[in-house]
Amino acid sequence: MTHAEDMARIAEDAKDWRRSIHEQPELLYELHKTAAFVEEKLKGFGVDEIATGIAKTGIVALIKGARGDGPVIGLRADMDALPMDEKTNLPYASKVPGMMHACGHDGHTATLLAAAQYLCQSRDFAGTVALIFQPAEEGGAGARTMIEEGLLERFGIDSVYAMHNKPGLPVGQFATRPGPLMAGGDRFMVTVSGRGGHASAPTMSIDPVVAAAHLIASAQTLVSRFSDPFDQVVVSITYLDAGSSGALNVIPDTAVFGGTIRTMNSDTRAEIEGHLRRMLNAGAEQFGCEAELDWRPGYPVTANDPAKAAVAVGAAAAVAGAENVDDDCDRMMGSEDFSYMLEARPGAIVWYGNGDSAELHNAAYNFNDEAILPGMRYWVELVQRELAA
Ligand SMILES: [Zn+2]
Ligand SMILES: [Zn+2]
C-alpha cells in the first residue's frame, strides 16, 4: 500500500472513531469515556509512552522517530463538548441530554488519533512527537492546567501546534496568519456603591444608578480614546443590575454591572485593565460614589510565532496546494486556550476547512468527516518538516 492509500484507509476508520466520540459528549474535565477511548486507541497503535490523568482526564502520548534524536514537537487536540442540546437529527447524535460536540473537538481528537496511528507505523522523522489530548477548552482553561501540571517540562516539549476546524472554509483548505489570530477575552464586574434613599429627595442620598450609567458609557471610550485604531478592541457591557422593580421610588445603595473586553494585542490587554480601573475610580468619585472592580482574567491573545506559522503554512501548502492556504487570514475576536501553550512555547494554530456547515456552538453544527484526511495529512507533513533529520 502506498503512503497515500494508507492514510486514506486510516482516515476512513477515524470517521467511526469521531462518530463514537460524538455520541458520548462530555464536559470540561470530566472526559472519562472520551479519555478511555483515546487511551485504548493509542495503546493499540503502539505509542512509546502514555501518560494519563494530566489535568484530570488529559492524555499525553509519545511517538519516537526511527531516524534518531531530535526535538519534541507537541500536537494538541481538545476533546471536550458543550453544555447544550444537539439538534442535528444525525444517527450518531449526542445520546446525552444537555451535552453536544458543537465545536468539533470530536473531530480534532479523531484527526490527531488518525495522525498518531500513521506516525506509529511510519516513524519517518528524527525526534519525538508528543500527542496532547486536552480537556476543558470550553471555558475551563484545560491547556493552562496541563501546563501547571508540568506538561511542557515533563515531556521536554520544544514547540506546540494545534488545529481548529472552520465552518465556511472549504474542506481541504487551511488558513492562519503570523502573530495574533484570536483575541484575549477578559471579564469584569463593577460594584458602584452610593447611599440609598427616597427617590423624591436625591440630595439626601448618593445615587449609584446615575453613576453606573455614566461609567457604562465611559467604558466605550476605552475603544475610541485609549486604544490604537489599528488595534482591535471590543468592550461589551452585558450585565446590569440595580434596585428592584417593586420599589421604583427607592434609590438603591448599589448598582452592579459587568461585561467582557476582547483584545488582539497582549500589551493592550495588559494596559486596558488599568485604564478601566482609573476611569471607574475617577468617574464614580465625580458622583460621590465608589466603584470596585472585580477583574476576571480569561484566555490570553492567541498569537502564532511567525517562524512556526511559516512552517505550518509550508506544511499546509504541501498537503493542499498553495492556492488552498490563506497565510494571512482575518483575525477573530473569539478566544482559544491554546493561547496558554503559545505563551509558553513557540508554535502555531491553523484553521482547517469544515465546509458548508452550521457555525461553531450552533445546535445544528456537525464536524465534517471529510476534513479528517486533510487534517491528518497536515499533521504528518508538519512532523516531517519540524523533525527532519
Ligand atoms: Zn468552542
Ligand atoms: Zn473549539
Image: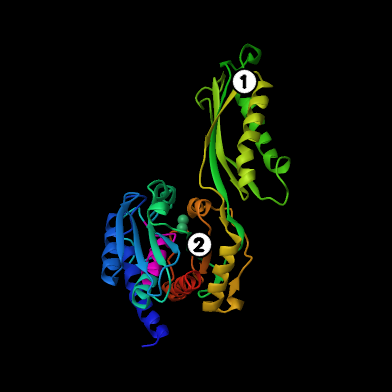
Picture residue at 50% right of the left edge, 72% below the top: 385
The residue under label 2 is: 359
Q: Nearer the viewer, residue 180 or 227?
A: 180
Q: Nearer the viewer, residue 151 or 127?
A: 127
Is 162 placed above or below 325 here? above
Indicate the secondary structure of the residue bearing disc 2.
loop
Picture residue at 53% right of the left edge, 65% below the top: 351
For the record, the magenta segment spans: 100-114
Q: Is residue 108 magenta?
A: yes
Q: How many labels does the image show?
A: 2
Query: In the drawing, what numbered circle is on residue 171?
Result: none
Q: Is residue 2 left or right of residue 44?
A: right
Answer with the quarter of the image where residue 255 lies: top right
Is 380 placed above or below 143 here? below
Q: Is residue 362 left or right of residue 306?
A: left
Task: Check if mark 2's residue and mark 1's residue have beta carbons within 8 Å.
Answer: no
Residue 323 location in percent, x, y? Answer: 61, 78
Query: In the drawing, what numbered circle is on residue 289?
Result: 1
The residue type indicated by label 1 comes to: Cys
